[in-house]
Image (cartoon, helix red, strand yellow):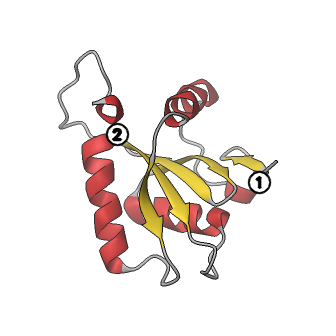
Protein backbone atom coordinates (compact mmCIF):
# COMPACT_ATOMS: atom_id res chain seq x y z
CA UNK A 1 0.00 0.00 0.00
CA UNK A 2 1.45 3.42 -0.93
CA UNK A 3 2.43 5.78 1.81
CA UNK A 4 0.09 8.72 2.39
CA UNK A 5 1.57 12.10 3.28
CA UNK A 6 -0.69 14.93 4.32
CA UNK A 7 0.37 18.52 4.34
CA UNK A 8 0.45 18.47 8.13
CA UNK A 9 3.38 16.07 8.01
CA UNK A 10 6.89 17.48 8.44
CA UNK A 11 7.68 16.45 4.85
CA UNK A 12 5.42 19.15 3.41
CA UNK A 13 5.51 21.78 6.12
CA UNK A 14 4.81 25.35 5.13
CA UNK A 15 1.44 24.81 3.44
CA UNK A 16 -0.71 24.80 6.56
CA UNK A 17 -2.98 27.81 6.10
CA UNK A 18 -5.96 25.51 5.55
CA UNK A 19 -7.74 23.85 8.48
CA UNK A 20 -7.60 20.08 8.84
CA UNK A 21 -11.36 19.70 8.50
CA UNK A 22 -11.35 21.62 5.21
CA UNK A 23 -8.41 19.61 3.93
CA UNK A 24 -10.16 16.35 4.84
CA UNK A 25 -13.28 17.42 2.95
CA UNK A 26 -11.18 18.23 -0.13
CA UNK A 27 -9.36 14.88 0.14
CA UNK A 28 -12.73 13.15 0.08
CA UNK A 29 -13.78 15.17 -2.99
CA UNK A 30 -10.47 14.49 -4.75
CA UNK A 31 -10.83 10.74 -4.33
CA UNK A 32 -13.32 10.65 -7.22
CA UNK A 33 -11.35 12.91 -9.56
CA UNK A 34 -9.29 11.75 -12.53
CA UNK A 35 -5.71 12.89 -13.01
CA UNK A 36 -5.78 16.07 -15.09
CA UNK A 37 -2.09 16.97 -15.25
CA UNK A 38 0.83 14.62 -15.87
CA UNK A 39 4.40 15.59 -15.00
CA UNK A 40 6.79 13.86 -17.39
CA UNK A 41 10.51 13.25 -17.31
CA UNK A 42 11.18 16.95 -18.05
CA UNK A 43 9.68 17.95 -14.69
CA UNK A 44 7.92 21.23 -13.98
CA UNK A 45 8.43 23.06 -17.26
CA UNK A 46 6.95 26.53 -17.92
CA UNK A 47 4.40 24.94 -20.29
CA UNK A 48 3.34 22.42 -17.65
CA UNK A 49 3.00 25.17 -15.03
CA UNK A 50 0.85 27.22 -17.42
CA UNK A 51 -1.36 24.19 -17.97
CA UNK A 52 -1.56 23.57 -14.22
CA UNK A 53 -2.55 27.19 -13.63
CA UNK A 54 -5.30 26.93 -16.24
CA UNK A 55 -6.73 23.78 -14.67
CA UNK A 56 -6.55 25.27 -11.16
CA UNK A 57 -8.29 28.42 -12.42
CA UNK A 58 -11.19 26.49 -13.91
CA UNK A 59 -11.51 23.53 -11.51
CA UNK A 60 -9.83 24.66 -8.26
CA UNK A 61 -9.15 21.05 -7.17
CA UNK A 62 -6.66 19.18 -9.37
CA UNK A 63 -5.05 15.74 -9.31
CA UNK A 64 -1.51 15.56 -10.71
CA UNK A 65 0.56 12.47 -11.47
CA UNK A 66 4.35 12.28 -11.62
CA UNK A 67 5.96 9.96 -14.19
CA UNK A 68 8.13 7.08 -13.00
CA UNK A 69 10.83 8.01 -15.51
CA UNK A 70 11.60 11.40 -14.00
CA UNK A 71 13.99 12.23 -11.17
CA UNK A 72 11.31 14.19 -9.31
CA UNK A 73 9.52 12.59 -6.35
CA UNK A 74 5.83 13.29 -5.83
CA UNK A 75 6.50 15.11 -2.54
CA UNK A 76 9.08 17.39 -4.15
CA UNK A 77 6.89 17.98 -7.19
CA UNK A 78 3.86 18.76 -5.00
CA UNK A 79 5.79 21.23 -2.88
CA UNK A 80 7.36 22.95 -5.90
CA UNK A 81 4.17 23.03 -8.00
CA UNK A 82 2.10 24.36 -5.09
CA UNK A 83 4.64 27.08 -4.40
CA UNK A 84 4.85 28.16 -8.04
CA UNK A 85 1.06 27.99 -8.60
CA UNK A 86 0.22 29.54 -5.21
CA UNK A 87 -1.91 26.52 -4.35
CA UNK A 88 -2.39 24.27 -1.32
CA UNK A 89 -1.16 20.69 -1.30
CA UNK A 90 -4.12 18.58 -0.17
CA UNK A 91 -2.42 15.19 -0.19
CA UNK A 92 0.34 13.10 -1.72
CA UNK A 93 -0.24 9.40 -2.34
CA UNK A 94 2.37 7.40 -4.22
CA UNK A 95 3.13 9.30 -7.46
CA UNK A 96 -0.10 11.32 -7.35
CA UNK A 97 -0.80 14.55 -5.51
CA UNK A 98 -3.75 16.89 -5.22
CA UNK A 99 -3.64 20.69 -5.29
CA UNK A 100 -6.31 23.25 -4.42
CA UNK A 101 -6.49 26.94 -5.23
CA UNK A 102 -9.69 28.89 -4.75
CA UNK A 103 -10.80 31.09 -7.62
CA UNK A 104 -13.00 33.91 -6.30
CA UNK A 105 -14.11 34.76 -9.86
CA UNK A 106 -15.97 31.46 -10.30
CA UNK A 107 -19.70 31.62 -9.73
CA UNK A 108 -20.73 29.73 -6.63
CA UNK A 109 -23.64 27.42 -7.24
CA UNK A 110 -24.76 24.21 -5.64
CA UNK A 111 -21.87 22.17 -7.10
CA UNK A 112 -18.18 23.01 -6.74
CA UNK A 113 -16.26 23.61 -10.00
CA UNK A 114 -14.44 20.27 -9.90
CA UNK A 115 -17.78 18.47 -10.07
CA UNK A 116 -19.03 20.49 -13.02
> Where's residue 45, x and y in %?
39, 80
Q: Observer-nearest residue: 31 or 16?
A: 31
> Where's residue 66, x and y in %?
56, 67
* Label annotation for residue 10: 1
Where residue 59 sits, quadrant-wise, is top left
Q: Height in image: 5 above or below 77? A: above
Residue ID at (33%, 50%): 56
Q: Height in image: 111 above or below 106? A: above
> Where's residue 92, x and y in %?
64, 51
Q: Observer-nearest residue: 14 or 102?
A: 102
Q: Height in image: 89 above or below 27? A: below
Residue ID at (27%, 15%): 110
Q: Which badge, 2 or 1, comes first in the chain's sequence?
A: 1
Please state, as top left, top right, bottom left or bottom right, where the C terminus lies in the image.
Answer: top left
Q: Which residue is mark 2?
A: 102
- Indicate left or right for 71 with 45 as reference: right
Amino acid sequence: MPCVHDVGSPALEGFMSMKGKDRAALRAEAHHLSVQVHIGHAGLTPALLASLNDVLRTHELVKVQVAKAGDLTAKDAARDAAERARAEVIQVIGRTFTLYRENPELKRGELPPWRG
